[in-house]
Image: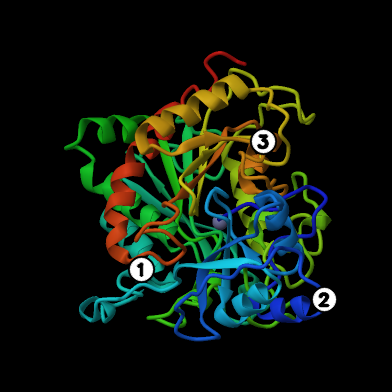
Amino acid sequence: MIRFSLFPWSRPRRLIALGAGVLLAALGTGLMTPGGAAAAVPDTTELAYYDVTSSPSTTARWLAADLARRGYDVLEGPLTDGVPILATAADTRRLRGLGLTVRYAGPLYQPVPASVQAAANTFYGGYHTVAGHEAHDQQVATAHPDLAVLRTIGRSWLKSQGRGGHDIQALCITKITSGDCALNTSGSKPKFTLMAQMHARELATGELAYRWIDYLVGNYGTDTAVTRLMDTTELWVIPIANPDGVDIVSSNSTRPVSQRKNAHDNGCTGTGLGVDLNRNSSYHWDVNQGTRCSETYPGAGAASEPETQGIQTFLSQIYRDTKPTADFSAATTATTGTFLTLHSYAELNIYPYGWTNSLAPNNTDLRAMATTMSRANGYDAVHGDGGLNYFAPGATDDWIYGTLGVPGFTIEVGPNGSSCSGFFPQYSCMTSFWNLNLPAFMALGNAAAHPYPTGG
Ligand SMILES: [Zn+2]
């Protein structure tokens, strides 16, 4: 999930769960009336999903903000069943001791069929490792020299330190003609960029990027819509925006590590390591998004991370800047291009702005594109705090719109509260995610030529 900060004045969202017990020990008296549902949880240290409620007087919004301030990994989503958190059983006992009702909502991990674990360059039943993505990118570019070009657009934090790490890769997919896929704005085709797995633990997103690549190169010349799109548009794909983080996630092939941020060594332990790359952009970067070890730590400064620098530089190279600097000055109707970043989960199509509830100057056209996506995938189209009570200053989608004028969207892939929900759904869930979201990808690709028909 990408966003948070329940209230603009609240403390950042997620200190790591390991720290929650300490914070709660200092809490003292409980906030709420007595409660405490029994929950059958196997292990005191294993993370799982829970819904927290207090009755009857405390609103869910207030409770969510309070839990976040106290260091819990509070998750985004509707508050109808309580405040969703990712926590250990030991943490939940402390919460119950405070008089809160805590309901076990489901495991972090799903059963993994043993038969598929052994596939090369995959983990957790089929998800591709960074090495798997890199091999795939290279294989596609080699096999389809007329349709794909592989570029290096940046490097990870570990690579920048000479400690291993990865380049950040981008594939340009189109029926290549002279001048296509250059790292400048001189090409004649409009561009659609799909980026995935900036938050490393959001496993579904990288897989959708992988399938998008295969779908495009596999259907050129046979599928009319794909052929037309690739004849007219450059389709850029950044399958793994945070490769160091994904290496951490995949380091346990059956029980992935819940790493969201990059691997910037900030002195924090466990998943406190790193910077939240979706709070690190240079547009409305906000120091108050999180303290050093929290899940929404925005870094030491705007665009402090090499991943952010690489991605921003790349996008600035390929898209023309058609928007005045002022937040509420509109991009011109001559704008071309579209951008999509994939996150999980909450079933949302998010359009700018995400840092404020004030309407973006191109709101009519932005909302129309998001609504088109909603007709495809059935997700709600939202902006601002989206009814979820949090803002996301420093996010990529706001950066590309606010800085360049290119319409930038986020899809939060996957549901709340089903067998395919959570950060680590069974790999078999990818088929339904793909079928739902492919038409949204196609719609944004087709919108790249003229994204602002009304100018409003
Ligand atoms: Zn996310």
Q: Position of residue 391 (x, y in %)?
A: 70, 46
In front: mark 2 or mark 3? 2
Which quarter of the figure has residue 439? top left
Q: Amino acid at mark 2?
A: Gly
Res 28 label: 2
- 155 or 267: which is nearer to us? 267
Q: Residue furthest top?
A: 454
Q: Position of residue 199 (x, y in %)?
A: 56, 61
- 59 or 113: which is nearer to us? 59
As drawn, 33 above or below 270: above
Residue with the mark numbered 1: 127
Mark found first going from the N terminus, 2 or 3 = 2
Residue with the mark numbered 3: 353
Mark found first going from the N terminus, 1 or 3 = 1
Mark found first going from the N terminus, 2 or 1 = 2
Contact (Cβ within 8 Å) of mark 2 with mark 3: no
Around disc 3, counting alpha carbons within 10 Å, would you say few (fewer than 14), some (14 to 19), or many (20 or more)? many
Q: Is residue 368 left or right of residue 154?
A: left
As drawn, 251 above or below 308: below
